[in-house]
Amino acid sequence: MTTPSKTERPTALSLRAELEIGATAPFHFVGTVSKPSHFPSSDIAFDGTTYWQTMRFRSRVVGLRMREAGDKGAPSVSVSVFAARKLSPTFLSKLEQEIASRFDLRADLSGFESICRSDQVLDPVWKRWRGMRASVAMSLYEFLIIATVLQNATVRRSVQMLEALFRRFGSRVVFDGHTLGAFWAPEAVDSADELELREIKLGYRAKTIKRQTDEFVSGSLDEPQLRALPSPKLRSMLLAVYGIGPASVGYLMFEVFKRYDSFVHISPWEQKIFSRLLYDQELVDVERILADLERRWGPWRALAAHYLFEDLFWRHERRAIPWLTPLIRL
């Protein structure tokens, strides 16, 4: 029997608390919160200066409105937190730490800046996006869901699968004039059977999502504990997650865990992009690309690649780049 998608009215998040979270200088707010290379999802909105998202944190769903604050010498982010019930000072303190971690607000980029200024490819990109951070809006569990729906699918198909999951297991909330989707607790998927996930057209990914969800519900995967692990141990733990391969682990290591040197695998579509960006050729051997990235940018190579990607996609948004369009297929 097919379980219908949720149709209830959005939950109003009408109570509001304010945070101001300091960031290290230099800091680029827009480049940090908005990532054109990421595919769109219904839990995030951005109007060019203000960023909104939902966050499930400590079993609570909150809405966040983030704006640039402070100044160049002492930058910060003004965060309005919207909730259905009053939030305790302890919750807000922990939430502040989580936001700072996910958006990498306390990063020291001085070593990276030195590399950029001496590199002819990175220098103009750094000048445009000086202080942009590796950021991720979602938790490790939520990122794994994204990585799974991206497997062997066009961007359009991935978006369709994620939105089907939101409709079936997630919720909708309204705050600050926006109605956004909110991720579900892992227990919601854990209590469903695999057939329910297949019925919303996830295909083989239904099994993967069920197995991954079980690892979180059982406690065998704990994001705060993983953050403290050295990179080799962390990589090993992530590779042991069901359905996760080298490409997904690279994204997890860099975006979720902020390991700037985690760039040891290049997917076919990334190969085409780096071939154009670095060599102005249609296709360059993967091993050559990886060797050149390590030689030129060493422990910062993943962050350097991120700057190049985001700069490319921002330029594409303003004026379509013909060779990039067929690689996106949204």
Image (cartoon, rainbow, N blue to C red):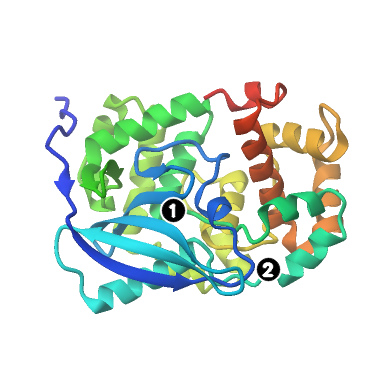
Residue at horizontal 54%, vertical 62%? 257
Q: Do the residues labelled 2 and 1 touch (CB within 8 Å)?
A: no
Q: Quadrant of the N terminus?
A: top left
> Residue 137 shows which numbered tag?
1
The alpha-carbon separation of the residues under discs 2 and 1 comes to 20 Å
Q: Is mark 2 on a helix, strand or loop?
A: loop
Q: Residues within 10 Å of mark 1 (few under 14, many from 20)?
A: some
Residue 117 visible: yes
In percent of width and height, residue 78 lies at 41, 65
Residue 155 picture location, percent across and down: 51, 28
Which amino acid does the dot numbered 2 rest on?
Leu
| Image side of residue 8 versus residue 288, left or right | left
Q: Is residue 35 left or right of residue 118?
A: left
Image-quadrant location for residue 220: bottom left
Q: Quadrant of residue 41?
A: top left
Q: Furthest-front residue in view?
A: 71
Query: Relative to 211, is 39 above or below?
Result: above
- Where residue 82 is drawn, which disc sits there? none
Q: In this view, does 234 lie to the left or right of 128?
A: left
Mark 2 closeness class: few <14, some 14–19, many ≥20 residues within 10 Å:
some
Q: In terms of secondary structure, where does tag 1 sit?
A: loop
Q: Which of 241 and 227 is in front in this view?
A: 227
Q: Answer whether residue 264 is visible to the viewer in this image.
A: no
Q: Where is residue 107 in the image (x, y as percent from the top left)?
A: 60, 70
| Residue at the disc numbered 2 | 109
Front disc: 2 or 1: 2
Say above or below: 126 vs 94.
Answer: above
Residue type, numbered disc 1:
Ala
- Which residue does the image show at 46% across and 68% down from the upper left? 100
Sequence order check, earlier mark of 2 and 1: 2
